[in-house]
Image (cartoon, rainbow, N blue to C red):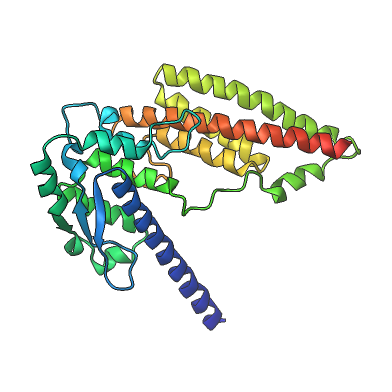
Amino acid sequence: MNSNTSYDRNTENRTSKRNEQIRAASLARTLQSSGIAEKARSPSGSAVPHVYQRCASSGHANDSSIPITSNPAYLAMASRMSSSKGSPSSTSLVSEYSEGGSERQDKNKSEQIDISNYLSEKNLNRKNLPIASLEALVKEGVLSDELSFVAYDISFDDDVFQKPQMIDHTTFDQLLEMDDDDQHEFSKSIVFNYFEQAETTIKELHGALKQKDLKKLSSLGHFLKGSSAALGLTEMKNVCERIQNYGALRSRDGALTVPSEEIALDFIDRTLSIVEDVYSDVRSYLEKFYQDLIH
């Protein structure tokens, strides 16, 4: 019994550490694709970068003379957030960002930033290893507090993370089991009532965003998250939870505080586009599901 418990705990610890290494590697890719810093060296056998090399285009990364949401490094990172609006590619933004001052660029490109001293054994084994890396890069002046938050949150959009399933059929099947006729009138009425509810809530989200009402945005995100979860609409639940967290000035996973309302509102605006896309896919899928089920 004890040996099994020990084995399970060890397996869980290894999985957790591996997941954090994946997160750290994703963070490194986010920093590189946004033109701030690229991984220069990692210890043998580790996916965690300990030495970064400042990119040539990073000269204005922490320029406080322009609004953070207009900062090219911010835009390059935020463009990775999936959206139907079609943000400019990070490559073109980095290119625009790096124009001028070739002497400065050469100096920046050759500069290496060793954060080994900040990554203690405790940090390397803790739950939020990417946060430890970001804190070190902030202390080294590579990132501002605002950009460190953006890099952390956007790194969740890396392709390495598996996209959640649209519907948890275990949950949805429980609803179908409550039908007492071949027409599935009960479950269908619940689902189509959800459609009305979701569309009303999305309209209210747009209104609250226009009013810059973060508290209401968080509340509406929480409401739509709950009703989506009740039907097993996993992907819809997840994106609504992001709006809930951003409205409460938290990162999408709740681990960090959003450094400004400006960033929170911009992230909600981008995420609301994703909510609309996911809802459209969910509605099309379920309408066809009932059409095929009844006929």
If the image is split into quadrants, where does the N terminus sit? bottom right
Considering the image in quadrants, where does the C terminus appear?
top right
Q: Is residue 211 left or right of residue 132?
A: right
Residue 73 visible in the snapshot: no
Residue 53 horizontal/vertical position (percent):
20, 54
Please state if 102 lies on the left or on the right of 146 as rendered.
left
* Circle count: 0
Instruction: Estimate the x, y position of residue 130 in percent, counting from the top left.
Output: 32, 55
The residue closer to the viewer here, 159 or 195, is 159
Q: Residue at x 57, y 24 (%)?
A: 201
Horizontal and vertical percent for residue 189? 78, 29
Q: Is residue 60 above or below residue 51?
A: above
Q: Is residue 44 left or right of residue 293?
A: left
**Please, is residue 2 above or below residue 167 in the view?**
below
Residue at point 43% right, 42% down? 252
In x, y percent, where is residue 284? 70, 32
Quadrant in the rendering for residue 4: bottom right
